[in-house]
Image (tube, rainbow, N blue to C red):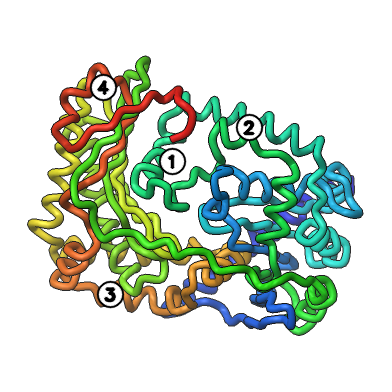
Amino acid sequence: MQRIKNTILLVCAVLLAALSLVQAADKTAGFTLPAYQKTTLENNLTLYLMEQHEVPLIYVVFVTPSGAVKDGEKYGLASLTGDGLLFGTNNYSKKEIENQLEFLGVRYGVSTSAEDTRFEISFLKKDFDKVMPIFKEIVRFPTFDEQEFEKRKVRLLSELEQAKEHPRRVIGAYFNKFLFGEHPYGNPTDGTLSSVGQIVVTDLRSFYQQNYRPSSSAIAAAGDFSSDEIKNQLVQLFGDWQGDEQPVGSAAQGQARFDRSRVLLVNKEAATETQFLIGSFGIERKNPDYVAVRLINTVLGGRFTSWLNDELRVNRGLTYGAYSSFNARKQTGTFYISSFTKTETTVEAIDVALEVLARLHDSGVSEDVLSSAKNYMKGQFPPDYETSGDLADFMCDMFIYDFNESYINDFEKNVDSVTAESARQIIDKYFPRDNMQLVLIGKASAIKEGVSKYGELTEKEIDADGF
């Protein structure tokens, strides 16, 4: 009964927090980031503390720049190490962690991306003294229990095998590998069958020791607390955590353009549809033109009424959806157009997508079209940061991607400042047009001849290991 009560209270608190922050945003002329404190402990662990007193709820996130880019040749190692934080600690078994946090109605989880690994937890204010010692143990003293590791490894291998039955789940990994090659940004976050199969539990322990350092990590907290009080509590929990300075890895630099068009055709012989991505390198997250790029992309493929979706879905009936996206990372990123179509209409759909991109370059964007996109973006923006959890994650993003609160505070101004003339400059600078890179998953025997016109062709079998 107690755990049910705590869970209900936590859910209500989340809903109230979202409502309160949305109402607060509506009362202001422009949406701005709430005040926060940033401090660095003597061991160089960075703290971000943001008070939000609307409901008695606290979000805490630990983030370390130990994502898939640190895998080396053992693809999937960073992700498995992140999962392994919950396999047990010096003082808690995996079952004890689950039982105690579930009893308190705590929501928690670990996620790993290309750039980082995060452990997030949210709980009621009254349970701080019960929850945070467990949080500390998970972050600082994981034991990576071998039995739990082996069970997770078996499940992951099964997940990797099943993923290739669904092209939409894996085409991003093929695209990143095709663009970045042996560069760490090409590393598949979840690994491959062969790489995961070779990982042993001692690899997780070594990866943790080498990469989880206070000097390169941060803790972001947002919620109902006093910043001074929670800072003192975090100092007690993490102030004595020691670790050598983490070596700086090689910077991930992307080219501005490829010197030729290429096509990767991944054969799935039983497929009746073709999933495709068309794109090239993108931008880094802290790029000063990031907001302007997002605005133009909203017109091209960033919303349901975008040019791509209108042309491929509404006007031509070639697909159920089409969109474009900039996936910005710390040093570079990707741009791609994504859609799927029937096998027999593959070439037509790709031609239409490329025609729409060419129209963006040739015609630019009118002031009327820009005005519509601006209203859409400004309306969609505040809900992205409506909970304390969203805000804690945003502070982690600032830490990992090296940008600041001006992204939120100046968002509306930066959106409004884009004109038809400056939009054309943004298009020419950041939206690729020539030497495009295409990745397709479909029935090769039916589409190979048609798609070979797009560039230098490479073929793979989807059943082959890796990407």
Label whose residue precedes the other's in the sequence (2 or 4): 2
Identify the residue position indicated by label 4 in the image: 343
Of residues 57 and 207, the one nearer the viewer is: 207
Residue drawn at (81%, 81%), measured in percent from left and top? 232
Q: CA distance from mark 4 to mark 1?
A: 21 Å
Distance from disc 1 to disc 2, alpha carbons, whole Å, reads: 18 Å
Of badges 2 and 4, nearer the viewer stands 2
Determine the residue positioned at 58% across, 82% down: 35
Q: Work out whether mark 2 precedes mark 3 in sequence or the reverse, and give the earlier one.
A: 2
Circle on res. 197: 2
Compute the Cα span from label 3 to label 1: 35 Å
Which numbered disc flags the more N-terminal residue, 1 or 2? Answer: 1
**Location of residue 133 by image quarter:** bottom right
Q: Nearer the viewer, residue 73 or 179?
A: 73
Hey, what amino acid is under mark 2? Gly
Q: In the figure, 168 relative to 41: above or below?
A: above
Residue labelled with disc 3: 416
Q: From the top left corner, tell me how far across and down residue 161 is, in percent.
A: 55, 26
Disc 4, SS: helix
Q: Name the residue at 38% across, 65% down.
A: 284
Residue placed under numbered mark 1 in the picture = 173
Q: Position of residue 202 (x, y in %)?
A: 75, 45
Horizontal side, residue 205 vs residue 29: left or right = right
Q: Secondary structure at mark 1?
A: helix
Label 4: few (<14), some (14–19) or many (≥20) C-alpha neighbours in 10 Å = some
Looking at the picture, tell me which residue is in the foreground, 167 or 49: 167
Of the residues under marks 4 and 1, which one precedes in the sequence? 1
The amino acid type of the residue labelled 4 equals Thr
Q: Which is nearer the N-term, disc 4 or disc 3?
A: 4
Q: Where's residue 348, x and y in %? A: 16, 30
Identify whether 422 is placed above or below 434. Answer: below
**Residue density around tag 2, few if under 14, some if 14–19, many if 20 or more, within 10 Å:** some
